[in-house]
Amino acid sequence: MASSKLAVVTGVTGQDGSYLADLLLEKGYEVVGLARRSTHYHHENIQHLAGRMILEYGDLIDPHSIEKILSTYRPSEIYNLAAQSIPADSWSQPIVTAEITALGPVRFMEAIRRLNLDTRFYQATSREIYGGVEQEEVDEDTPFKANNPYGVAKLYAHLMVDTYRQSYDMFACGGILFNHESPRRSLHFVTRKVTMAVACIKTGIKNPPLNEAGRPLVENGMLKLGNLDAVRDWGYAKEYVEAMYLMLQQDHPKDYVIATNTAFTIRDLCETAFGHVGLDWREHVRSDEQFMRPTEIAASRGNYARAKADLGWEPRMTFEQLLQYMVDEDIRRFEER
Ligand code: NAP
């Protein structure tokens, strides 16, 4: 099977994969979404795409499943969004993080090369490749300083993208994305924990979802988080997948920082989300050692000037609007149950 506009999206059950599949379908692409097999289906983010997208199963650890999909579909574009994507888990699972997050993309680029495909490749790099860089603002030319196993794995993959681009003239781009969120964000991440906790408390839900420690996310009206002073540059995921698409439509492949160039603390996040429904976050949030990272990334903002100049991309939704939207969506889901 071959098509001039056929895209493979890995990690399609995740936040970005599902938004990107929406976008590519709107643009008239045939979309092949890659998911990995698990005993329990968790297809909440792609439920609405049933019948519109081809769903294939494969695993970034398994080169045979990757080659089979690429030789069957011979895609014009591949967006590799699959990863062990949770920095906090990368300390407890550094080897599997390396297998999936570092080597997974190399398995794709090798398959493109070995099958002699004319396929454009997008790799989901992360701002975590800058890790401990102590600079207020970073861009594509800032030297990397990854300081956790997830960041190191993403950095390896990012450098391999550059290596394949230079060595084999492959059209491959690394999108250096800063944190981006949405109602489709997994509960492993702090934004969604907070907006979900607000919704649980506001609606008085009896059985809150469980956190990664297997405890109710909210117990006795309290949410436990890690370092409340951590600073992030947060944007809206639906806008960030537009940048991924635009990168693969350019004449020349390059890496791009995608960010908002703003910075907020976890305290700001709590204040905005709880405040949206008239709650005082200080009565509901506690910092707990259990959720602290062994190393914290520095408080840098992303300078997206290159993306603005080349792709015409810039963020639109503000931090406040994003959190209010996520809180409203979480409340709506509980009320519809
Ligand atoms: P996400 O929601 O956690 O999605 C990750 C996806 O990867 C899931 O569909 C997951 O499947 C899949 N996956 C994990 N291991 C796999 C494997 N071995 N084989 C095949 N699929 C596998 O992440 P996201 O927020 O959409 O982020 C997309 C990408 O951008 C990730 O690579 C992430 O590291 C990177 N990134 C994200 C951000 C952000 O702020 N969101 C920022 C920078 C970079 P399961 O559901 O089965 O686990």
Image: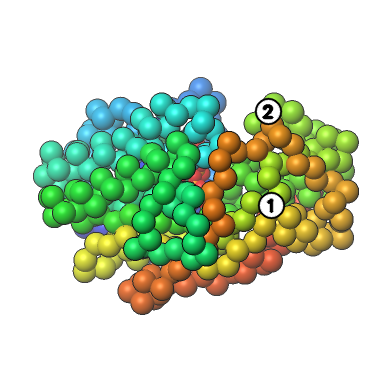
Residue furthest to the front in view is 134
The disc placed on residue 53 is: none
Q: Residue at x 33, y 54 (%)?
A: 174
Q: Nearer the viewer, residue 154 or 335?
A: 154
Location of residue 4 by image quarter: bottom left
The kind of residue tagged 1 is Asp
Mark 2 vs 1: CB contact within 8 A: no
Q: Which residue is mark 2?
A: 213
Q: Quadrant of the N terminus?
A: top left
Q: Secondary structure at mark 2?
A: loop
Q: Nearer the viewer, residue 130 or 80?
A: 130
The disc placed on residue 229 is: 1
Q: Is residue 248 left or right of residue 137?
A: left
Q: Residue at x 78, y 49 (%)?
A: 199
Q: How is the image coloured?
A: rainbow
The kind of residue tagged 2 is Ala
Location of residue 242 by image quarter: bottom left
Q: Quadrant of the C terminus?
A: top right
Q: Is the residue at mark 1 in contact range of ligand 1, meaning its CB lies under 8 Å from it?
A: no
